[in-house]
């Protein structure tokens, strides 16, 4: 089966997090993803960290390693938020299996299980 056929059979949701320096609801998201079992077959995670002083999230963070390389210095209420969103989408669109995209802030919380 080709990779495109595999993606069509199992499309993923890309969770795109815009945050300043971390995700306040991280424990809820950890539980959300881990409750789905093999969540990496269902979802992808991308994090844009706006605070340039935060090179990477702490290695103990569930989201460590999911930061995108493109960093935009964001000013809330400014067009820079759109640029950061585009950077997240650009990173997520590199993975052909990402079929749906959820844009989230650092204070969002999941309401439903990933695996319904």
Image (cartoon, grey):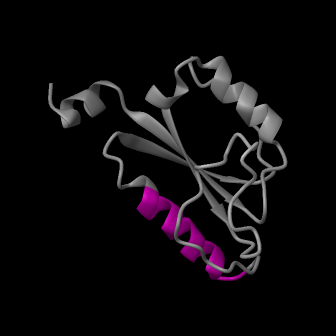
Q: Nearer the viewer, residue 11 or 64?
A: 64
Q: Examine the rendering and report whether any part of residue 42 can be seen.
A: no
In screen coordinates, is 96 left or right of 37? left
For residue 81, above or below residue 108 = below
Q: Residue furthest right?
A: 24
Residue that lies at the very extreme toward the front in this rendered image: 59
Q: Residue at x 52, y 61 (%)?
A: 88
Name the main secondary structure of what is drawn in magenta: helix
Q: Is residue 6 magenta?
A: no
- Give coordinates of residue 68: x percent, y percent: 54, 61
Q: At 35% across and 55% down in the image, what residue appears? A: 94
**From the viewer's perspective, is residue 62 above or below residue 36?**
below
Q: Note whether 17 is above or below 45 in the view shown.
A: below
Residue 66 in view here: yes
Is the C terminus in the top left, top right, bottom left or bottom right quadrant?
top right
Quadrant in which residue 71 is drawn: bottom right
Q: Nearer the viewer, residue 115 or 41?
A: 41
Q: Residue at x 70, y 82 (%)?
A: 78
Residue 115, given in percent of the width and then of the height, sits at 56, 19
Q: Quadrant of residue 91?
A: bottom left
Which stretch did the figure color magenta?
Answer: 78-91
Is 4 left, or right, of 59 in this rendering?
Answer: left
- Quadrant in the picture for residue 62: top right
């Amino acid at each position: 089966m080709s990779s495109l056929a595999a993606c069509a059979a199992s499309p993923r949701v890309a969770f795109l997090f815009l945050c300043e320096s971390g995700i306040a609801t991280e424990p809820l998201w950890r539980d959300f993803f881990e409750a789905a079992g093999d969540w990496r077959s269902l979802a992808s995670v991308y994090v844009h960290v706006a605070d340039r002083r935060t090179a990477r999230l702490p290695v103990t963070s569930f989201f460590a390693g999911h930061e995108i390389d493109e960093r935009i210095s964001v000013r809330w209420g400014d067009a820079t938020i759109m640029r950061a969103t585009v950077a997240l989408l650009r990173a997520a669109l590199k993975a052909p299996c990402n079929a749906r995209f959820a844009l989230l802030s650092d204070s969002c919380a999941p309401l439903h299980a990933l695996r319904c």
